Image (tube, rainbow, N blue to C red):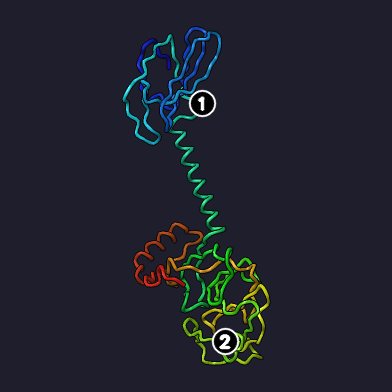
Amino acid sequence: MLLTRSEPVDSCAMIGRSVTFMPGKTIMRVDARQFDHDLVAADLGDDGGSADRINYRIAADDSLTLDPVGAKCELRETIAVDLNKMWLNPQAEYGAPHGQKRGFEDVEAILVAIVIAVILRMFVVQAYRVSSGSMEPSLVEGDFLFVNKVSYYFSEPQAGEIIVFAYPLNPSKDYIKRIVALPGQKVEVRDKQLYIDDVPIRDDEWAIYTDPETIPELFSPRDNFGPFHVPAGQYFVLGDNRDDSHDSRFWGFLERKHVKGKAMFIYWSWAPDSQAPEIGPPLYIDGLISSIFYNATHLTQRLRFGRLLSGV
C-alpha cells in the first residue's frame, strides 16, 4: 500500500503493521503494534545512508492514539504522513497482526489451563467414582467424590479415615476403604466383632452386616480373622459393608506407598439404572442422544439430591 506526502492514515489500521519510511537515503521502520503502555515518540534522526529499525510505542502526548489490548478499536486520530513516501506492510516482521496475536494468546491461555489442571489432578485433588457397594452406607454405587491428595504429604493416615489406594494385587485398580488399625496395633475379628488391641470396637456408626450367618475361620476370614499385629508402615482396612467387601481380611495389610489420598466429599451421586441406554459402538451418536433424553426425563429418579456435597 503506497501513501504519498501528508496523506492521513487510520490509527486502527496501523495496529499490527510495519511502516517503512524512506526520507532520502535513510531507511527507517516503525512498528505500530498495540501495547498496554503509552506510545513513546521515536527519534527518526537523519544520518543518511544508515538503516535503523525503531519500535513505535504509545505515548499520551503523541498524535497517535491506540486503544488498550482487548478493547474495541475506534478511529480517534490519524497519522499525518509528512515524509516523501511510506509503505505499509501488513505482514510486519516485528510481530503478527493483532488478530493473529490474540489467537496465539488464546492458545497459550488454554495450554496453561490444561497444565494447571494436570498438576492439580496429579498432586492436589482427583475425582473418583464409587463402582461397588462395599462401602455402604457411607458410600454407595454411583457416588462421585473428590479425594485430597495433598493431606498425606504432611501427615499420616489415621484410623477411621476413608482412603483411596492402589489395590496391592493389581496396582492399576483403585480401591476405597476405611482404615481401622494403624501400624503396630493388634487387630482381630471374632464372630464379626472387630477388636483393636483386644478392645471391642463399636463401629455401628458406619459399619453394616447384611448376612445373619457367621462363617467359620476354616472356610473364610470374613467373620473370623487374626489376631495379627499390623506391620510398620502398613494399615488394616475394611469396607463398611462388612459382609460384602474384599479388603485386608482377604488380601492382607496395605502398605503406605499405595495410599493415594483421603476422601473429602461427594460432589455428584447418580443412581445406577439398568434401563438407561448405553453409549458404544457402532452407533455412538444415537446412543448419546438417547442417553441424554433418557437421563433428562429420569433426572429425579437417578440424581440423589440428598447426597450432593455431603462429607465422608
User: What amino acid is at disc 2?
Assistant: Leu
**What is the x, y in percent for residue 274?**
45, 72
Q: Nearer the viewer, residue 253 or 39?
A: 39
User: What amino acid is at disc 1?
Assistant: Tyr
The N terminus lies in quadrant: top left
**What is the x, y in percent for residue 213?**
54, 92
The residue under the point 40% across, 68% down is 308
Relative side of 62 to 200, left or right: left
Q: Nearer the viewer, residue 94 or 244?
A: 94
The residue under the point 54% across, 76% down is 178
The mark nearer the N terminus, 2 or 1, is 1
Above or below, comparing residue 54 to residue 228 in the picture: above
Q: Which mark is residue 194?
A: 2
Above or below, comparing residue 247 to residue 123 in the picture: below
Residue denoted by label 1? 94
Q: Residue furthest right?
A: 231
**What is the x, y in percent for residue 222?**
60, 86
The residue under the point 67% across, 82% down is 229
Above or below, comparing residue 176 to residue 70 in the picture: below
Above or below, comparing residue 107 to residue 234 in the picture: above
